[in-house]
Amino acid sequence: MIVGNIDGTSMIDIADERFKMVFDKMRELTAKSELGKTEMQGDDVYYTVMEIDSAPLSEKKYEAHKRYIDVHYVIKGEEAIGMESTRELGMLKPYSAEKDCMLYRDGDSMSTVILKEGDFCVLYPGEAHKPGGYVSEFKKIKKAVFKIKV
């Protein structure tokens, strides 16, 4: 997992062109960006802009992926994302190739990352995470989730 802010990171040195493309697109997104899915390189790189209601992390389920890197980017609001090693979690729903997702039961040692406007979090395949958590109060979050095929 990598956490950073789009204004405070030098993405010029990233060798992977797909990541450069994702970070360039992040800089263009605003609170007025349209909701929905946009393909950047077909199924290899795409993103979805969404508005979600934050909720307690205790109400969220851990998810992990196999085929895609997730890049969560907060456009407006703030979001808590819970993370835990899959070794500590019990399987709740086996892997679905169609959704590139498996769900896990809660464990005992969750770490939490707080993302504010302009912050991003890169989650690699197999890293269990609970997105959409509230920070200090229930709010709408506008965010983009980028998918980069591995």
Image (cartoon, grey):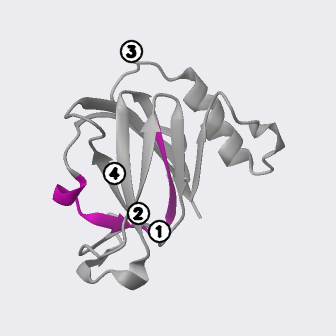
Residue 36 makes an appearance in the image: no
Is disc 4 surrounded by few (<14), some (14 to 19) or many (20+) residues within 10 Å? many
Q: Check whether the beta carbons of the residues at disc 2 and disc 3 lie within 8 A of each other.
A: no
Residue 9: give x, y in percent of width and height. Answer: 71, 36
**Residue 143 drawn at (x, y percent):** 39, 34
Q: Which residue is at a point 44% across and 34% down the rendered structure image? A: 74
Q: Which residue is mark 3?
A: 32
Disc 4 is placed on an element classified as strand
| Element type where label 2 sits in the image | strand
> What element does badge 3 sit on?
loop
Which-is-in-front pick, marks 2 and 3?
Answer: 2
The numbered mark at residue 83 is: 2
Pointers 1 and 2 in contact (CB under 8 A)?
A: yes
The earlier-in-sequence mark between 2 and 4 is: 2
Please provide the residue range marked out in magenta: 57-73
Q: Which mark is residue 127?
A: 1
Q: Residue at x 59, y 25 (%)?
A: 27
Residue mark closest to the camera, 1 vs 2: 2
How far apart are labels 3 and 1 at the CA level?
31 Å
**What is the quadrant of residue 28 in the picture?**
top right
- 36, above or below 97, in the image: above
Q: Position of residue 102 (x, y in %)?
A: 32, 72
Q: Secondary structure at mark 1?
A: loop
Q: Amino acid at mark 2?
A: Met
Q: Amino acid at mark 4?
A: Pro
Give the mark nearest the N terminus, 3 or 4: 3
Residue located beneath label 4 in the image? 131
The amino acid type found where label 3 is placed reads Lys
Distance between mark 1 and mark 2 Cα atoms = 7 Å
